[in-house]
Amino acid sequence: MENKTKMLIAVGAAVTANCQPCLKTAVSQAQGTGAEEKEIIEAIAIGRIVRRGAMGKMDKFASTLTGKDV
């Protein structure tokens, strides 16, 4: 896998993990591999989609554990 691809994955993963220092580092490193602004923005958008899905699943899981809509 190319370094640029790895760094774009890291950008998306950082967004999904809500890790600001990770995102700052990943964006900087992605830029260093030649990733274009459009590619970085797309990786951020994908991370947001994954985070939103995971958050919804976690909310449902928490509700099943408590028996309440949390």
Image (cartoon, rainbow, N blue to C red):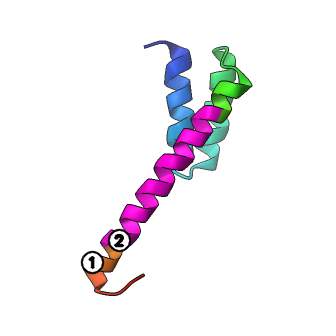
At 37% from the left edge and 62% from the top edge, which residue is drawn?
Answer: 57
In the image, taking residue 14 as reference, residue 21 lies left or right, namely right
Q: Main secondary structure of the magenta part?
A: helix
Q: Which amino acid is tagged 2?
A: Lys
From the top left corner, tell me how far across and down residue 64 is, in percent.
27, 77
Q: Which residue is at the front of the view, 3 or 57?
A: 57
- In the image, which residues are magenta? 42-61
Residue 5 location in percent, x, y? 51, 20
In the orientation shown, which residue stands out farthest toward the right? 37
C-alpha gap between disc 2 and disc 1: 6 Å
Check the image and report above or below for 16 versus 25.
below
Residue 65 versus residue 32: which sits nearer the camera? 65
Mark 2 neighbour density, 10 Å: few (under 14) some (14–19) many (20 or more): some
Residue 24 falls in image quadrant: top right
Three-letter amino acid code of the residue under disc 1: Thr
- Residue appearing at x 57%, y 49% in the figure: 19
Q: Provide the residue designation for mark 2.
A: 60
